[in-house]
Image: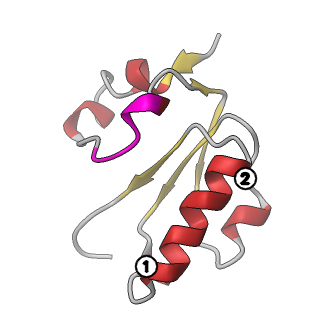
Amino acid sequence: MHITVEQALSIYPLSEGKLIAGTEGTSRIVKSVNVMDAPDITDWIKDGEMLFTTAYLMKDNPEEAIQLLRTLNKRGSAGLGIKLGRF
């Protein structure tokens, strides 16, 4: 059984997070979850995967962050969660 991003955001601890963009994507199906901070992260993303990261590798490079978002969308990622605060 799979759940939507919206349903996932209602479950603790994700319910403690804040959706800041992509409200149109809350109906996407979450098929799997991955936690990764590798530089080649987009090479490993699968359709329906919810990715969690500290975004440490792109913290000083906004262009890289934009490219990551575009690639995740193109590959059918369910969503991206970023841990804020200390890395």
Which residue shows up at 41% across the image and 67% down it? 54
- State the quadrant of the N terminus: top right
Q: Which residue is mark 1?
A: 56
Instruction: Report whether 6 appears left or right of 25.
Output: left
Q: Secondary structure at mark 1?
A: helix
Predominant secondary structure, magenta span: loop
The number of discs equals 2
Whether residue 10 is visible here, answered yes or no, is yes
Looking at the rendering, which quadrant does residue 9 occupy?
top left
Determine if the magenta segment contains residue 59.
Answer: no
Which residue shows up at 77% across the image and 58% down it? 44
Looking at the picture, which amino acid does disc 2 mark? Answer: Ile
The magenta span reads 20-24
Q: Which residue is mark 2?
A: 45
Q: Toward the viewer: 30 or 21?
A: 21
Q: Dot 1, crowdedness within 10 Å: few (<14), some or many (≥20)?
A: some
* The residue positioned farthest toward the bottom in the image shown: 60
Judge whether 9 appears above or below 64 on screen: above
Distance CA(mark 2)–CA(mark 1): 18 Å
Looking at the picture, which amino acid does disc 1 mark? Answer: Tyr
Q: Earlier in the sequence, mark 2 or mark 1?
A: 2
Determine if the magenta segment contains residue 21.
Answer: yes
Instruction: Report whether 86 appears left or right of 35.
Output: left
Q: Dot 2, crowdedness within 10 Å: few (<14), some or many (≥20)?
A: many
Which residue shows up at 56% across the image and 26% down it? 28
> Residue 69 in the image: x percent, y percent?
55, 59
> Residue 39 in the image: x percent, y percent?
65, 79
